[in-house]
């Protein structure tokens, strides 16, 4: 008889129904009989391989860009088919995202705990001590990352570091996050000690740099600036990471493991591990066979500085009728510039552009990327470019872009932010920010005449600078929500409207195109937090309202999943407001 335990740590973390506890006696096919498993190098490797199942890492957080002011989905805030709502103030413990993050986190924590508790069998059987140390380190890393997610989104959570019996799990309560945070740091430290700097085999397994970088991220999210700065600096000091020369190439499916990528979960069409086809279908424009309905927001387009380093409402270089010109190059690497080639066509959403050039045939054809012909083309005219190229059409809708969780640009910006918050501003802070910004222009940080280098040294100015730099550098990388939440700006940035073009499209043509005001009628104003205001356009009847974002104060913490509370009442009280 196998030892009875909760494979995911707590009853609901497993997704087990109370009446279905007999399933605890079922042993995963890859893990043999629990009385003898973890006894050999082969068994340990099989167990460790399961730490890299992509669902543990991307569910549901790879969708989180949708929950921010960086995106829009037609006249809604986000994909309406995912079973939950983030930006309409109705979040509850029954929501899919709330349950999925909790469940996937505890499942991976359980796998890590199971290995750590049973790896003594391999030690007793004489398995190579170095290999055992490495396996332990991978388990510590996985556990630390998942507790980091749980603490950020739920606050106080159950802490599990071993098997639990059914009665123990049912009695389990939430542990104050202040007690768990040091334990998470300890796990990251043990991971960093036991993981290699790199893998000779070229494997994309966890590394020492990943442990240091993820520790820095967690510390940054917790406001532990000194810990964050030290961990980020330790990652930098490994001297194995660098920025790619071309920003846009980093995110393409043809780009393999490069020195900028620190922690990725790889995808493979051959192994049936592909990007969610919803993102692919809705990211590809309609002319190329997609829907073109998951789009960057005007808010994001307005955020990119001009090439003189000024925001668009202050720069003489900004022309609202040519909003992509004279902008930070990351703008057109992230959002498709109107009138340029993309996915086999010239992209032109103008209501006057009834025909468009097919670059494959060399002929003009009906333009389905304009709402003059296709009602459900992009409602704000924008489509994503970052990570998307013609290769997406080869096996459409299957693509294999890596899931990038951490890259070196983020480490540099985390280091800079932590030092700024400590008010320890020195040359290293400016160098970190400028290294990231200069790469966008294709030059080194020292080539200050070729890009708008950061020179300010006062804390308030640099705080605004690094926050903006994070937004434009990391757009579409599913970090914006966490940034807004930890900066306590979510209530401001996410209580706004998504504005869209007038429809029917003839109305847009009359209001903007015929008056020479396409695609933007004027400069939007940018406030002290880098947030754009488009209300003047609406007041003048030049655009219409899309969705209303709504982020209440209570949502800085998510509710505990209802099903968890039903099975484990000691998880009460819930977070405030739920």
Image (cartoon, grey):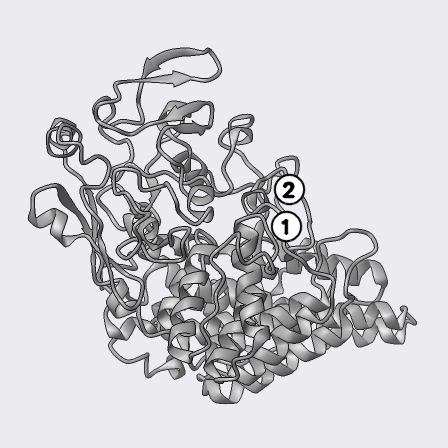
* Residue at the limit of the structure toward the front, as seen here: 449
Residue corresponding to mark 1: 244
Residue 485 or 380: which is nearer the viewer? 380
Residue corresponding to mark 2: 255
| Count of all numbered marks drawn on residues in the image | 2
**Residue 477, x across and y down, in percent:** 48, 54
Along the horizontal axis of the image, is 148 left or right of 350?
Answer: right
Q: Is residue 44 above or below residue 569?
A: above
Residue drawn 25% across the image and 69% down it:
491
**Residue 555, x across and y down, in percent:** 30, 71
User: Label 1 vs label 2: CA separation?
Assistant: 11 Å
Residue 418 or 574: which is nearer the viewer? 418
Disc 2, SS: loop
Q: Is residue 332 above or below residue 413?
A: above
**Residue 313, x across and y down, in percent:** 26, 55
Asked if residue 381 shows in the view, the reply is: yes
Q: Is residue 150 above or below residue 470?
A: below
Along the horizontal axis of the image, is 547 left or right of 565?
Answer: left
Residue drawn 45% across the image and 37% down it:
280
Disc 1, SS: loop
Residue drawn 7% across the image and 46% down it:
540
* Residue at the limit of the structure toward the left, as seen here: 540
């Amino acid at each position: 008889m196998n030892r009875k335990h909760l494979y995911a740590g707590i009853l609901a973390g497993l997704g087990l129904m109370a009446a279905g506890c007999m399933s605890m006696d079922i042993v995963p096919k890859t893990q043999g009989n629990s009385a003898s498993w973890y006894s050999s190098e082969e068994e340990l490797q099989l167990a460790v391989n399961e730490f890299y199942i992509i669902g543990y890492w991307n569910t549901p957080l790879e969708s989180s860009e949708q929950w921010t002011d960086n995106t829009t989905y037609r006249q809604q805030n986000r994909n309406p088919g995912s079973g939950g709502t983030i930006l309409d103030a109705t979040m509850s413990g029954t929501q899919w995202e709330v349950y999925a993050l909790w469940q996937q986190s505890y499942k991976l924590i359980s796998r890590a705990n199971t290995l750590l508790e049973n790896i003594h069998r391999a030690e007793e059987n004489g398995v190579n001590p170095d290999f055992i140390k490495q396996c332990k380190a991978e388990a510590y890393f996985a556990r630390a990352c998942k507790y980091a997610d749980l603490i950020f989104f739920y606050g106080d959570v159950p802490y599990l570091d071993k098997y639990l019996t059914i009665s123990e799990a049912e009695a389990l309560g939430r542990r104050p996050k202040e007690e768990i945070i040091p334990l998470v740091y300890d796990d990251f430290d043990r991971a960093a000690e036991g993981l290699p700097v790199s893998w000779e085999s070229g494997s994309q397994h966890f590394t020492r740099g990943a442990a240091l970088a993820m520790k820095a991220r967690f510390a940054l999210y917790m406001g532990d600036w000194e810990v964050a700065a030290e961990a980020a600096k330790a990652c930098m000091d490994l001297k194995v990471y660098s920025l790619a020369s071309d920003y846009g190439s980093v995110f393409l499916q043809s780009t393999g493991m490069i020195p900028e990528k620190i922690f990725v979960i790889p995808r493979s069409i051959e192994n049936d591990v592909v990007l969610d086809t919803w993102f692919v279908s809705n990211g590809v424009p309609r002319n190329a066979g997609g829907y073109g309905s998951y789009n960057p927001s005007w808010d994001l387009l307005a955020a990119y500085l001009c090439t003189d380093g000024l925001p668009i409402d202050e720069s003489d270089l900004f022309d609202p009728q040519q909003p992509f010109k004279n902008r930070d190059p990351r703008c057109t690497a992230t959002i498709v510039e109107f009138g340029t080639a993309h996915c086999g066509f010239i992209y032109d959403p103008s209501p006057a552009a009834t025909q468009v050039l097919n670059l494959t045939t060399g002929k003009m054809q009906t333009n389905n990327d304009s709402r003059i012909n296709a009602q459900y083309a992009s409602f704000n005219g924008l489509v994503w470019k970052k990570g998307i190229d013609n290769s997406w059409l080869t096996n459409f809708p299957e693509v294999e872009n890596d899931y990038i969780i951490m890259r070196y640009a983020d480490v540099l910006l985390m280091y800079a932010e932590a030092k700024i918050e400590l008010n320890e501003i020195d040359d290293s802070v400016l160098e970190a920010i400028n290294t990231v910004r200069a790469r966008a222009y294709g030059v080194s940080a020292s080539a200050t005449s070729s890009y708008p280098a950061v020179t300010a040294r006062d804390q308030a100015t640099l705080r605004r600078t690094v926050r903006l730099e994070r937004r434009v550098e990391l757009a579409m990388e599913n970090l914006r929500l966490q940034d807004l939440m930890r900066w306590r700006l979510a209530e401001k940035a996410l209580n706004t409207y998504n504005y869209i073009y007038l429809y029917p499209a003839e109305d847009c043509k009359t209001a903007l195109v015929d008056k020479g005001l396409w695609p933007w009628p004027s400069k939007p104003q940018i406030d002290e937090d880098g947030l754009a205001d488009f209300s003047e356009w609406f007041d003048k009847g030049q655009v219409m309202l899309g969705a209303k974002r709504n982020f209440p104060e209570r949502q800085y913490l998510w509710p505990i999943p209802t099903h968890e509370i039903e099975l484990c009442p000691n998880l009460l009280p819930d977070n405030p407001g739920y």
